Amino acid sequence: MARQLRDRLALAGAVAAPGAADALTARLVAQAGFPAVYMTGLGATATRLGAPDLGLLSQVEMADQARAMVRACAVPVIADADTGYGGPLNLRRVVEDYAAAGVAAFHIEDQQIPKRCGQLSGAKLVPVSEAARRLQAAVAARDASGSGMLVIGRTDALGVEGMEAALDRARAYQDAGVDLVFVDGIKTRAQLEAVAQHLPGPKVVSLVDGTDAALLRLDQISDMGFSICLYALTTLLAGLTAQAAALAHLSQTGAVRADPAGFDYARFSALVDLPGHQAFSHGYEE
């Protein structure tokens, strides 16, 4: 999967990677024809714990989530690896676990531990030198694993120290040897254009639903020079919206809402490949 993602990145156009909070959503993303899926830490925390993204999931839980998503879909999985969950040995372990799971790429950020969602204010950053060493350790662990995973260096400095500091950190992370860099927390088109103009080389952007930057089309993102576009919250928010509406209708009317365009049991069965599972089972049952 790492090779597949590298080959796709060598082609023209940014890779669109919608976020998935679980294996079922990852399968849905792949079925929709997207070339990659993003394992969002915010979504994983929300679905596993019903809690906000404040560094509550452990590296073991995140690796387990990644493994399930890789098994569920046939496209490369780009995984959130937060800060690396501790020191260099912790970081090496999560890289090894992600490699064993079949993850295609992962990003490491420059926040202090415990981290918080990149869209929230109040993040605390480690010094640039420490963040660069963290990324060098990730690259070394990746190389030792022989997996070919792509290492993405993420900075959360935009909302803390401003655009210039974020760009300086991203350049330092490029010098540390990562494959791509990622300035998180972009909310406006102006911020997106500033990163595109002043940060050459392979880079990632995350577009969050409801922001000015998210109004841009993928072809516009590609023209700006971004390599990967993450839509981290699109499926999570859409799913919650649909579930809340269905529950409100059931509560108010006492009946299930009919939706001809929605999922029924037959469509769900096709998504999880019930026929394929049954065919295999029946072939070995008396």
Image (spheres, rainbow, N blue to C red):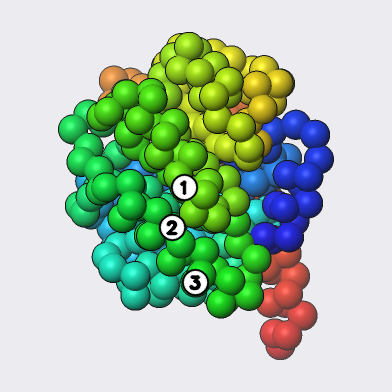
Say which residue label 2 marks: 135
- Which circle's residue, 2 or 1, is located before the other in the chain? 2
- Which circle's residue, 2 or 3, is located before the other in the chain? 2
Say which residue label 3 marks: 141
Q: What amino acid is labelled 3 in the image?
A: Ala
Question: Does residue 253 show up?
Answer: yes
Q: Residues within 10 Å of mark 3 (few under 14, many from 20)?
A: many
Q: Nearer the viewer, residue 118 or 233?
A: 118
Say which residue label 1 marks: 173
Residue at the bottom extreme of this rendering: 286
Q: Nearer the viewer, residue 54 or 84?
A: 84
Q: Are marks 3 and 1 in contact (CB under 8 Å)?
A: no
Identified at 42% across, 34% down, the residue is 168
- Which circle's residue, 3 or 1, is located before the other in the chain? 3
Q: Nearer the viewer, residue 281 or 138?
A: 138
Q: Are marks 2 and 3 in contact (CB under 8 Å)?
A: no
Q: Residues within 10 Å of mark 2 (few under 14, many from 20)?
A: many
> In what element is the residue under mark 1?
helix
Identified at 61% across, 32% down, the residue is 200
Q: What amino acid is labelled 2 in the image?
A: Leu
Left or right? Give the position of 27 relative to 188.
Answer: right
Instruction: Identify the image quadrant of the C terminus.
Output: bottom right
Rounded to the nearest angstrom, the CA distance separating label 2 from label 3 is 10 Å
Q: Is residue 9 above or below residue 194?
A: below
Q: Are marks 2 and 1 in contact (CB under 8 Å)?
A: yes
x, y percent for residue 145: 57, 76
Question: Does residue 16 show up?
Answer: no
- Rendered image: mark on residue 227: none
